[in-house]
Amino acid sequence: MTRQEFQDRIARSILLFDGAMGTMLYSRGVFINRCYDELNISSPDIVKSIHEEYVAAGAKCIETNTFGANRFKLRNHGYGEQLVAINEAGARIARAAAGSDVLVAGSIGPLGVRLEPFGPLSEQDAFDSFREQAEALASGGADLFILETFSDLHEISKGVAAIRSIGDFPIIASMTVHDDGNTVYGTTAEQIASGLDGIDVDVIGLNCSVGPPAMLGAMERIIQISEKPLSVMPNAGVPRMVEGRNIYLASKEYMAAYARRFIQAGARIVGGCCGTTPEYIRGMRNFIAAIQPQTHPQIHPPREVAGVVIRPVPREEKSELAARLSEGAFVTSVEITPPRGCDPSKVIAAAKTLRENGVCAVNVPDGPRALSRMGAQHLSVLIRSEAGIEPVLHYSCRDRNLLGMMSDMLGLQALGIRNLLIVTGDPPKMGDYPDATAVFDVDSIGLTRMVHTLNQGYDLAGNPIGAPTSFHIGVGLDPGAIELEREIERFHQKVEAGAEFAITQPVFDLEILERFLTRIGGSPIPIVAGVWPLVSLRNAEFMNNEVPGASVPEEIMSRMRAADSKERALEEGISIARDAVRLLRGRVQGVQVSAPFGNVRHSLKVLEALK
């Protein structure tokens, strides 16, 4: 891997490293007086199995078991003559466990001997030691190098120079600090930042010694000085002596929550050090996936098959909703949340009422707010067959891997479902089963690409699937997003990936929508605006404070405050929504109205504004 490829990768996505190797070896009965690096030769299967556990947990970069495999530390154990063999074996073992999708970082630790003028080791000897270890790791197949757990800026700079002398590899330079944010030699976090900023490394890192809170504090100080990408790999808390053993007491949930805080503060690489295990990395992986799923699933080029001509279905022929949007008509839909139990009768009856009143489609959310409800796919099929109205199926990336998603799409095509609203999905932590595991193989952009590929008549491997699918692809849109530039960029990516229409978050403040449309210079695809009839002041406060992108202006809040009863509040909420629908008609190509308490009569009262 070139340095530019590595820099592009961490700029595009968070890179999750593995956890502790020593902790895992100790748990397998390897005593701490052993030379752990030598296990690469004497017990390679144990080392490989640990690497494989971290890969299975979701690590996208694993470190070689070579932290102490330099000439000085190996000599103390009697293995000095096997330096090259131990390091090469460490890299080969990691490479075999990593496969093609996971990176291998050659791990190099401090030499264990102080450099002159504060110790007996000459700069040249230090350079030579780092170089011979780096050469062996590169020979074994390392993609990049991580110099970790250093306290001396002078020593780590010699390690960087040695690696640079053998090739243009990506380098992470990682120091270790105490609770005060300083190294054992008194080097401050600010001095670490300026010192590492001045040498030729790709990432500045912190690892080991302390738990997440202290490391977050040091990291925030480094960010003020350096603009280089940051790597953070804390211990699982501060160890406590329990019956003669050092035990790390921080839970995997605690570590995972801090991984998210590291990322939000600016880290591009996260992982774990002493005390962390594959379970900790799995927890971090789930948090990272919720923040940043893939936008580019691996899709192979189409394979041409002699005599097979694939003609994608024109957009206007995909569904009634697609036809109406294609001809420029103003469309209406109502969102009905699936029931908690297994009885769909009320939803079916409500859908029939909507059809009888001329509504174009029924929107069916997929596990909104990560709450457990009847499957949106199954309910959509029932609505189509029993109520005779087109569903718009919300499809979340949270719960299924890519293979499951593709299987779902092929099945939905066979069952006649055509309109999709592809969403990334809410993380389980916010729902009623917080211990559930999110999948998040891809985000909404990645799934849009995949469905578009199926619409062209090919699967992810580039194989023809026979008749192409004919999904009318919709995506979500948040005109009031806090990170508006990112939302605009993602919107354009969704369009490029194959989106054919978009539905917004609930719109209360039309000025926010107008500003968004102005910023994008007019939408290349039809936009359907979300409209939410408020039912109470509490509901308005909830929307304003807890629903991303749903900004309720003070004028509307005042109207809801003035309502002096439940009935009056509902009437006022419907009136506000009717006003919004009237104003939206000339600005967007449709409205999606939510049904308060599942009562579509309220939604129909809102849609009367169109008459």
Image: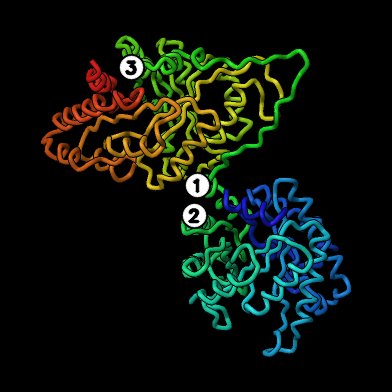
Which numbered disc flags the more N-terminal residue, 1 or 3?
A: 1
**Badge 1 amino acid:** Ile
Q: Nearer the viewer, residue 103 or 131?
A: 131
- The residue located at (47%, 59%) in the rendering is 265
Residue 584 visible to the viewer: yes
Which numbered disc flags the more N-terminal residue, 1 or 2?
A: 2
Frontmost of labels 2 and 3 is: 2
Rounded to the nearest whole Å, what is the CA distance between mark 1 and mark 2? 8 Å
- The residue located at (54%, 45%) in the rendering is 289
**Badge 3 amino acid:** Ala
**Badge 2 amino acid:** Arg
Q: Quadrant of residue 307?
A: top right
- The residue located at (49%, 70%) in the rendering is 225
- The residue located at (79%, 61%) in the rendering is 138
Residue marked by disc 1: 291
Q: Mark 3 Cα within 10 Å, few/some/many (few <14, many 20+)?
A: many
Residue marked by disc 3: 350
Label 1 close to label 2 by CB (< 8 Å): yes
Rounded to the nearest whole Å, what is the CA distance between mark 1 and mark 3? 35 Å
Question: In this rendering, is residue 234 above or below 5?
Answer: below
Question: In this rendering, is residue 602 above or below 352?
Answer: below
Residue marked by disc 2: 260
Q: Is mark 3 on a helix, strand or loop?
A: helix
